[in-house]
Amino acid sequence: MAFLDSAIWSEKIFLNGWRAGSAEPTDIVEPATGKVLDRAGLASADDIREAAQKAAAAQKAWAATKPAERAAVMRRAGQLFEEHATELIDWIQRETGAIPAKAGLEINVAANECYDASALPHHSMGDVLTSDEDHWSFARRLPVGVVGVISPFNFPLILSIRSVVPALALGNAVVLKPDPRTPVSGGVMIARALEEAGLPEGVFQMVPGGADAGAALTEAPEIEVVSFTGSTAAGRKVGEAAGRNLKRVHLELGGNNATVVLPGADVAMAASAGAFGSFLHQGQVCMTTGRHLVHESIAEEYVAALQQKAEQLPLGDPTDENIAIGPVIDAGQRDNIDRIVRESKDAGAKVVAGGTYDNLFYSPTVITDLTEESPAWSQEIFGPVAPVRTFSTIEEAAEIINTSEYGLTVGLLGNVGEAMKLADLVRSGKVHINEQTVSDESNAPFGGFGNSGNGSRVGGYTTNIEAFTEVQWLTMRPEIAPYPF
C-alpha cells in the first residue's frame, strides 16, 4: 500500500484518526493541468474546537512520556520522509506546481526538521539560579500545552513541519490547519508520518479549512500559542485575535526582499543569483528577491544578463523534464501578479522581459525604470518578477532597503568588505553575503522585522525552546521556611 494511499485520507481530516470533516470536501487541483488530483476533507469551526479539546486531553500524557520515546517518534518520522521521498516529491510537484528540485528540497528539510526535533527532548530545559535566600532556585522550561499552527500554500510541507515537530518534541500537542489548496503537502504527509512513527492518538490533529476554521483556531481557549505563516494582512488578524485572547503568537509574514549588486561584482554570477532569487518556485516564496538594487556602474550589463536568464528559462508543467518555471497556484494569484506589472508599466516602468502569461504560467519578468512608488517596487508581488533599480553609494542602498515596510531578508553580492559595511546599516531578519535572499536551514533562526513578522520564532534549539515552552520559577528548601506571622 502506498504511503499516501487515498483510501486512507481522501475526503477526511485527521481528528483523533481519519474521519470526515463537517465542511464540504474540496477538490485538490493540479495547477499545471487543471486536473483534479483527489478530494480533501475540510474542517468546520466546530471541528477545530473539537480538535483543540482532544489535543488538550492528550497533551499531559504525551508531556510525561520519556524524552527518549519522544525523540524516537521524531527520528522515525524523519526516516519515513526519506523512505517515501519519491512518492512525496511527486505529490508536491503536482499539488503545488513545484519543479523537482524544489519538491526534493521540501522533503529533505522535512526530514531534517524531524531529526533536529529529536534532539530537543534531551536538551537542557532550565537554569540553576543564584539566590540570597537559603534555598535552591531554578528556572525550568515546561511545554506550553497546545500549539496551533496555520500554514500557507507555497512551501506547505516546510512551513508546517518547522513548527509542528519542535512543538511536539518539547511535549506539546499540536493542531495544524494547512491551506486548503495544498492539504496533502501541508498536512496529510505530516499526519501520515507521525501516525506511522507511533505518535499517540490525539497529540496531533490535522484540520484543513478556510477562514472560519482559522478564526476558530485563534479563539480556542485550549490553544496557548499560535504559529502563523502567511500574508501580512492575514497575520494582522491572527495577531489581533491572539492578543485579545492573551495568547502568544509567532508571525512569519510577507517580504519585499532586496538583493544588492555591489560595484565590481561578477555580473554573470550576480545575475544567476538574482534570477534564482526572483524566479524560484515562480516567485511564490516569502524570501523571494522582490527588489534588485544594482550599482549604477554595472546596471546596464546586469539588466541585460538578467533579461537573458528570464527569456531562456523553460516554462511549463513541472513534471516534464528540464522545466525551471512551473505554474502559479491559482488564477487569483496570477491576476494579482499581472495587475502589479500592468500598473507599474502604466506608471512609466519598462518591461524588458516577460510580462505575459498563458493560463497559470506567468513568464519570468524583468522590469526597470521604477520609482519608489511603483507597485512592482513597493508591493510584495509573490510572482516571477524581477524589478531593478540603481544606487550610487552603500548609504543610499541602505536607505532604499530600509524604506520598505518589510524586513525579512537581504542578499548582498560583491566585495565582502563593502557588503559587511552595508550589512550593518540594513534592518532585516536575515542578511546573506554573496548569496541571494532565499535561504533556510532547519537549525537556523527564521523571522523578520517590521511587517515581515515579530522576529525569529522558529529554527534552532534556542529559538524553538523559547517558542514552545513556558518558564517556571522553582525553589526548594530542606525544611519549611520560618516566617514572622
Image: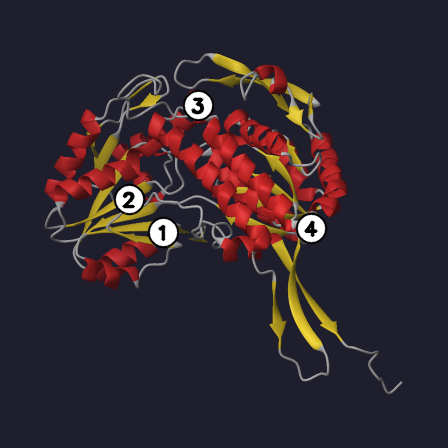
Earlier residue among tags 2 and 4: 4
| Label 4 CA crowd tier, 10 Å (few <14, some 14–19, many 20+) | some
The N terminus: image quadrant: top right
In the rendered structure, which amino acid carries the disc numbered 1?
Ser
Residue 43 in the image: x percent, y percent?
66, 27
The residue that appears at 71% across and 69% down in the rendered structure is 474
In the rendered structure, which amino acid carries the disc numbered 2?
Arg
Residue 336 image-quadrant placement: top left
| Label 2 CA crowd tier, 10 Å (few <14, some 14–19, many 20+) | many
Residue 434 in the image: x percent, y percent?
23, 50
Residue 473 in the image: x percent, y percent?
69, 68
Is label 3 in a helix, a strand or a loop? loop
Q: CA distance from mark 4 to mark 3?
A: 34 Å
Residue for badge 2: 291
Q: CA distance from mark 2 to mark 4?
A: 37 Å
Question: Are the residues at dot 2 and dot 1 in contact (C-beta closer than 8 Å)?
Answer: yes
Question: Are the residues at dot 4 and dot 1 in contact (C-beta closer than 8 Å)?
Answer: no
Residue for badge 3: 330
Q: CA distance from mark 2 to mark 1?
A: 10 Å
Q: Please name whichever residue, 149 or 55, is drawn nearer the observer in this view of the structure.
A: 55
Earlier residue among tags 4 and 3: 4
Q: CA distance from mark 3 to mark 1?
A: 27 Å
Is label 1 in a helix, a strand or a loop? loop
Q: CA distance from mark 2 to mark 3?
A: 23 Å
Question: Are the residues at dot 2 and dot 3 in contact (C-beta closer than 8 Å)?
Answer: no
Residue 404 badge: 1
Residue 245 badge: 4
Q: How is the image coloured?
A: secondary structure
